[in-house]
Amino acid sequence: MINPKCENGCELFLTSRGTMRPCFWISEFSEERKIFDDNDNWNLNKTSFKKIVEVHLKEFIEDIKKNPLKVCINECTEKHKD
């Protein structure tokens, strides 16, 4: 089960180009970064911080609960202990 750490908005990451990402795990080396870097909805130069948090982040969280990104699976699922 995925438990998004970004759900409370405390894990947001801002790139030097003004793009918000849900967390720092979506790094410059991550393929998933393109989802945010190529989308004006996540760019502070084109979308307000409030709208990113209240609209786009919430939509992202609902989407990853149904179809999580690889990075979300790796970082936001509970690890089963043997």
Image (cartoon, helix red, strand yellow):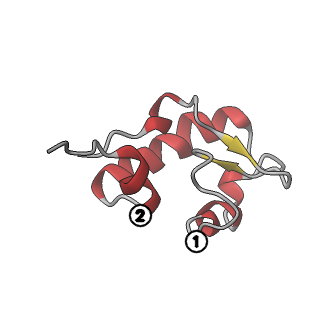
Identify which amino acid the numbered label 2 is placed on.
Lys
- Residue 82: x %, y % from top left: 14, 45
Q: Nearer the viewer, residue 75 or 20?
A: 75
Q: Residue furthest front?
A: 82
The disc at residue 47 is: none
Return the residue at label 2.
Answer: 70
Residue at (31, 46) in percent of width and height: 77
Which residue is painted at 65% across and 58% down in the image? Answer: 27
Q: Nearer the viewer, residue 64 or 45?
A: 64
Identity, as a three-letter code, of the amino acid under mark 1: Glu
Q: Is residue 59 above or below residue 34?
A: above
Query: Percent from the top left, x then y, of residue 20?
Result: 69, 47
Q: Which residue appears at 49% of the width and 28% of the height?
A: 8
Counting other residues with Cα less than 10 Å from the Cα at mark 1, is it few (<14), some (14-19), or many (20 or more)?
few
Q: Residue furthest toward the left? A: 82
Q: Is residue 79 left or right of residue 18?
A: left
Q: Residue at x 47, y 50 (%)?
A: 60
Residue that mark 1 sits on: 31
Q: Position of residue 13 (x, y in %)?
A: 68, 43
Callout 1: helix, strand or loop? loop
Quarter of the image for residue 10 reads: top right
Q: Is residue 6 above or below residue 65?
A: above
Q: Secondary structure at mark 2?
A: helix
Left or right of 60: which side holds 32? right
Instruction: Name which of mark 2 and mark 1 comes first in the sequence.
Output: 1
Q: Position of residue 66 (x, y in %)?
A: 28, 55
Disc 2 to disc 1: CB gap under 8 Å: yes
Displayed quadrant of residue 78: top left
